[in-house]
Image (spheres, rainbow, N blue to C red):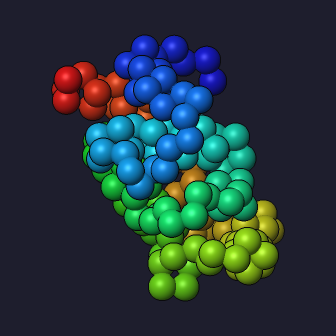
């Protein structure tokens, strides 16, 4: 993806080379950073890649849902929430091995659960990747 987006880049630039806790960011910057960061990871390998990585300790996954909603991507926010609902109590396990074992149940390409549940939800993110960037820019411009 070679989208040049000065407004989004400017938000990220504020925190470049700084060790910043995502919890300390204001909702505006956190929404831009989390939606764009999540989208980049999802675009690279889907939700299996997103959930296989270690997310900063203390991050509430609901923040990703809120981030998509805040930038105006309501359907993707709903899809993200539905994917989270596949985890016990709607929260991915903290332990990476435990989370990966849980993920195997849904993310095996041969799994009917994947095809029936995750396939369409995940494809919406792939199909709308450029829209996420455009929505983030519009969100920044509207709030500026």
What residue is at 38 percent from the left and 50 percent from the top? 24
What residue is at 55 percent from the left and 85 percent from the top? 88
Q: Position of residue 54 (x, y in %)?
A: 68, 60
Q: Nearer the viewer, residue 17 or 104?
A: 17
Q: Position of residue 18 (x, y in %)?
A: 55, 34
129 vs 103, left or right, is left
Is residue 102 visible to us here? yes
Q: Position of residue 119 (x, y in %)?
A: 61, 59
Q: Nearer the viewer, residue 42 or 125?
A: 42
Determine whether 43 is above or below 17 in the image.
Answer: below
Determine whether 143 is above or below 34 in the image.
Answer: above
93 vs 60, left or right, is right
Determine whether 30 is above or below 129 in the image.
Answer: below
What residue is at 34 percent from the left and 55 percent from the top? 66
Determine whether 111 is above or below 121 in the image.
Answer: below
Q: Quadrant of residue 78?
A: bottom left
108 vs 84, left or right, is right
Q: Quadrant of residue 138?
A: top left
Q: Nearer the viewer, residue 138 or 116?
A: 138
What residue is at 41 percent from the left and 55 percent from the top? 23
In which quadrant will I find the N terminus?
top right
Q: Nearer the viewer, residue 80 or 22?
A: 22
Q: Position of residue 10 (x, y in %)?
A: 42, 20
Q: How many marks?
A: 0
Is residue 73 visible to us here? no
In which quadrant will I find the C terminus?
top left
């Amino acid at each position: 993806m070679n989208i040049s987006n000065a407004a989004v880049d400017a938000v990220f630039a504020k925190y470049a080379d700084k060790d910043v806790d995502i919890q300390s960011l204001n909702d505006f910057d956190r929404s831009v950073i989390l939606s764009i960061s999540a989208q980049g990871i999802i675009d690279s390998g889907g939700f299996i890649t997103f959930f296989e990585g270690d997310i900063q300790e203390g991050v509430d996954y609901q923040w990703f849902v809120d981030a998509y909603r805040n930038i105006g991507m309501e359907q993707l926010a709903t899809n993200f929430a539905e994917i989270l609902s596949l985890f016990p109590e709607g929260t991915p396990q903290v332990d990476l091995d435990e989370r990966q074992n849980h993920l195997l149940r849904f993310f095996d390409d041969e799994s009917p659960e994947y095809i029936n549940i995750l396939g369409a939800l995940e494809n919406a993110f792939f199909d709308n990747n450029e829209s996420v960037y455009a929505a983030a820019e519009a969100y920044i411009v509207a709030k500026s």
